[in-house]
Amino acid sequence: MANELSVSISLQYTNGNSRLSIPSAQQLIDVGSQVRAANTQIIGTTAEALDMLDVANAGASYFLNTDATNYVEIGVSVTGTFYGLIRLMPGKAAFCPRLATGTPFARANTSNVNLEYIIFSQ
């Protein structure tokens, strides 16, 4: 099968006289299998791997920072050094059509945050 996941994205921007509008665009994404990791993980201030459960290769992913105060970064760890690629402010979410890492890592800003996520198999 193909195109198992459907995502719609639109964008509206207004700042003074500057305006931008991108109408809703649908993305169809292939998902490798029915296996997915859906979890809420407590993320501390030291980078930690997200629990992938039975997902072997990370594909499309959705993240939600449920904290009311602190941001969380999602990224990669290369030989023990964490590189944040996405910064989710409190209460904000992000969608990635395909992660470029086998195992994503996360790190909270100043205090633990609860990070909800769904990672589909590639």
Image (cartoon, rainbow, N blue to C red):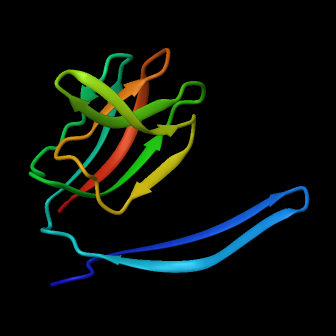
The N terminus: image quadrant: bottom left
Residue at x 26% of width, y 22% of height: 81
Give the number of callouts: 0
- Viewer-proximal residue among 5 and 78: 78
The C terminus: image quadrant: bottom left
In the figure, is residue 120 to the left or right of 13?
left
The x and y percentages for residue 61 are 33, 55
* Up-down relation of residue 77 to residue 28 (above or below): above
The x and y percentages for residue 66 are 50, 37
* Up-down relation of residue 71 to residue 122 (above or below): above
- Viewer-proximal residue among 80 and 3: 80
* Up-down relation of residue 25 to residue 93 (above or below): below
Residue at x 14% of width, y 67% of height: 34
Residue at x 47% of width, y 51% of height: 94
The answer to which image quadrant residue 21 occupies is bottom right
Give the farthest residue toward the bottom: 1
The answer to which image quadrant residue 92 occupies is top right
In the figure, is residue 13 to the left or right of 32?
right
Residue at x 35% of width, y 25% of height: 43
The x and y percentages for residue 52 are 17, 43
The x and y percentages for residue 5 are 31, 74
